[in-house]
Image (cartoon, rainbow, N blue to C red):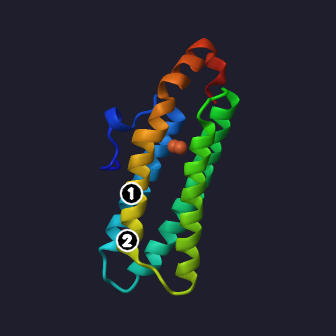
């Protein structure tokens, strides 16, 4: 399992979101291995995993944003703003890669910092809110 996941620091108290966060951190962990690898196929492998991370992050942001919207989370705009910044940065990394610029270590460091910080700070802010909403209406968990 991912070495970066820590229940106390990262669990937002929602099983599906926690599972998605664990997967995202696990993909960042794979990128760390590929960014330190100087063998010929490592760069292509890094790019494949980067594409996988971009797709999975889109799925996660969709799940999280629609769940928070459904429950009327008051800080949704801040959430979406941070997600949008991330999407823009990822688009830039992928565009640069198509032009032959792929700074693997720098990209990996940015991504792991972003995810650890976003989950532990910004996502963690909705934990209490979501728990209270779901306790009041367990059918709203999906
Ligand atoms: Fe988020
Ligand atoms: Fe999240």
Residue 138: x and y in percent read: 61, 17
Q: Is residue 24 above or below residue 48?
A: above
Q: Is residue 20 above or below residue 138?
A: below
SS under mark 1: helix
Q: Nearer the viewer, residue 112 or 50?
A: 112
Q: Residue 66 is drawn in which quadrant?
A: top right
Label 2 belongs to which residue? Answer: 106
Residue 101: x and y in percent read: 48, 84
Q: Is residue 122 above or below residue 4?
A: above
Mark 2 residue CB less than 8 A from any atom of ligand 1: no
SS under mark 2: helix
Q: Is residue 140 visible?
A: yes
Label 1 belongs to which residue? Answer: 112
Label 1 close to label 2 by CB (< 8 Å): no
- Residue under the image location 43 percent in, 58 percent down: 27
55 sits to left or right of 127: right
Within 10 Å of disc 2 (Cα), the crowding (few <14, some 14-19, many 20+) is few
Q: Quadrant of the C terminus?
A: top right
40 sits to left or right of 82: left
Within 10 Å of disc 1 (Cα), the crowding (few <14, some 14-19, many 20+) is many
């Amino acid at each position: 399992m991912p070495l970066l996941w820590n229940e106390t620091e990262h669990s937002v108290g929602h099983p599906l979101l926690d599972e998605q966060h664990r997967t995202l951190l696990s993909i960042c962990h794979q990128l760390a291995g590929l960014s330190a690898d100087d063998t010929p196929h490592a760069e292509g492998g890094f790019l494949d995993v980067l594409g996988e991370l971009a797709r999975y992050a889109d799925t996660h942001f969709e799940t999280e944003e629609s769940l928070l919207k459904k429950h009327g989370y008051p800080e949704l705009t801040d959430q979406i703003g941070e997600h949008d910044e991330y999407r823009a940065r990822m688009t830039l990394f992928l565009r640069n890669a198509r032009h032959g610029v792929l700074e693997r270590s720098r990209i990996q460091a940015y991504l792991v910092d972003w995810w650890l910080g976003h989950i532990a700070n910004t996502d963690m802010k909705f934990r209490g809110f979501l728990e209270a909403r779901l306790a009041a209406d367990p059918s709203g968990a999906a």
